[in-house]
Image (spheres, rainbow, N blue to C red):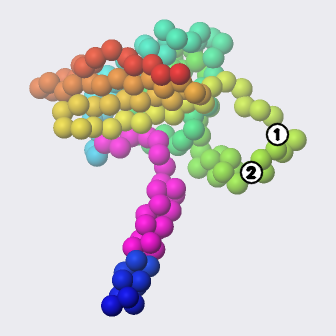
Amino acid sequence: MNKMITASNAVFILMLVLLLLNGCATHPYGNFIQNPSIVISKVMADDVTAQIVRLYPAANTQFNLRHVVNDPFGHALIENLRLAGFAVQEATQQSIQQQIFAAPHQPDTEPQKGFTLSYIVDQSSDLYHVKLMIDDMRLSRAFAVQADSIHPAGLWVRKE
């Protein structure tokens, strides 16, 4: 009986470790909506851009994306920021791997200029959530879908 308990505990611990490792291997940023609508993504990106314009001077600000953008919201956001006059440095899979595997204090690398930018877009029933991370500041806002349109469901929340 003790051997079965020990074996089941070992299996449980192994499963827990594998689950934790899987969480470390996945990307924590991006768009987590299945088949995101281009129209809804554009409306949310327009609203996010308007908020960023309120907070940062366009001609003097560069944003460095922390993750690869491969969704309609991210593409619309990058385009909007550039049209508003911001410099945007997009991340590539290669640049992310270099950051992960780089030595902690390499003297020959320059510090990156500008602010790091990442986002999370997700959905719960008829509410969409946009969370922005700009350096240490967090911005979030909910959006409600009504018929075929989307509208802000509250004010921007800012956490520093």
Q: Which mark is residue 133?
A: none
Residue 147: x %, y % from top left: 11, 26
Residue 67: x %, y % from top left: 54, 41
- Left or right side of 22 for 109: right
- Left or right side of 18 for 91: right
Q: Which residue lies furthest to the left in this view?
A: 147
47, above or below 123, in the image: above
Q: Mark 1 points at which residue?
A: 109
Q: Which of marks 2 and 1 is nearer the N terminus?
A: 2
- Left or right side of 63 for 123: left
Q: Is residue 108 magenta?
A: no
Q: Which residue lies furthest to the right in this view?
A: 107
Q: What stretch is highlighted in magenta?
A: 12-33
Alpha carbons under labels 2 and 1: distance apart: 10 Å
On the question of residue 42 being in view, the answer is no
Give the residue type at disc 2.
Ala
| Residue 6, picture quadrant | bottom left
Give the residue type at disc 1.
Thr
Quadrant of the snapshot with the N terminus = bottom left
Q: Is residue 17 magenta?
A: yes
The residue positioned 28% from the left and 46% from the top of the image is 34
Q: Contact (CB < 8 A) between labels 2 and 1?
A: yes
- Left or right side of 127 for 132: right
Circle 1 residues within 10 Å: few <14, some 14–19, many ≥20: few
Circle 2 residues within 10 Å: few <14, some 14–19, many ≥20: few
Q: What element carries label 1?
A: loop
Q: Which of 37 and 48 is in front in this view?
A: 48
| Residue 9, picture quadrant | bottom left
Q: Name the residue under label 2.
A: 102
The residue positioned 48% from the left and 22% from the top of the image is 159
The residue positioned 35% from the left and 23% from the top of the image is 141
